[in-house]
């Protein structure tokens, strides 16, 4: 699954779980999404993102960005680049 995709522009998934957030969850999620958009904008790519609610938080689907800068601020947030992930489970 996804091992041999033809899309030259990669898609990443930022996996934000409520357990990794302190304070107001909605405010923190919005803060993380804005940080992701800023980092994508710095690469010159389209900085639009899509979100999918999950049982434990939210998945943010986006284009690649500077992962080192992101991890400096959000070390506990997972970013899935090349592995299968369950996008939605009712």
Image (cartoon, rainbow, N blue to C red):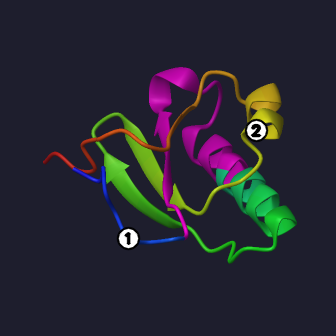
Q: What element carries label 2?
A: helix
Q: Which of 32 and 25 is in front in this view?
A: 32
Q: Is mark 1 on a helix, strand or loop?
A: loop
In the picture provided, is 37 more to the left or to the right than 19? right
Count of numbered labels shown in the rendering: 2
In the picture provided, is 41 more to the left or to the right than 2? right
Residue at x 61%, y 22% (from the top left corner):
76
Reading the image, the residue beneath label 1 is 6
Residue at x 43%, y 43% (from the top left corner):
82
70 versus 3 height, above or below: above
46 versus 83 height, above or below: below
**Looking at the rendered structure, which numbered label has been put on residue 27?**
none
Residue 26 on the magenta segment: yes
Q: Which of marks 1 and 2 is in front?
A: 1
Residue at x 34%, y 63% (from the top left corner):
5
Instruction: Give how far across and how far down residue 41 sits, in percent.
Output: 80, 68
Reading the image, the residue beneath label 2 is 70
Q: What stretch is highlighted in magenta?
A: 9-32
Residue 71 on the magenta segment: no
Task: Classify residue 20 by image quadrant.
Answer: top right
In the picture provided, is 11 more to the left or to the right than 31? left
2 versus 76 height, above or below: below
């Amino acid at each position: 699954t996804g091992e041999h995709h033809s899309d030259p522009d990669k898609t990443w998934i930022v996996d934000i779980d409520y357990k990794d957030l302190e304070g107001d969850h909605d405010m923190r999620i919005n803060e993380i999404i804005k940080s992701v958009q800023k980092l994508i904008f710095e690469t010159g790519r389209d900085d639009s993102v899509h979100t999918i609610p999950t049982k434990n938080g939210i998945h943010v689907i986006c284009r690649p960005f500077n992962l080192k800068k992101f991890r400096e601020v959000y070390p506990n947030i997972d970013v899935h680049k090349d592995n299968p992930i369950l996008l939605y489970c009712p």
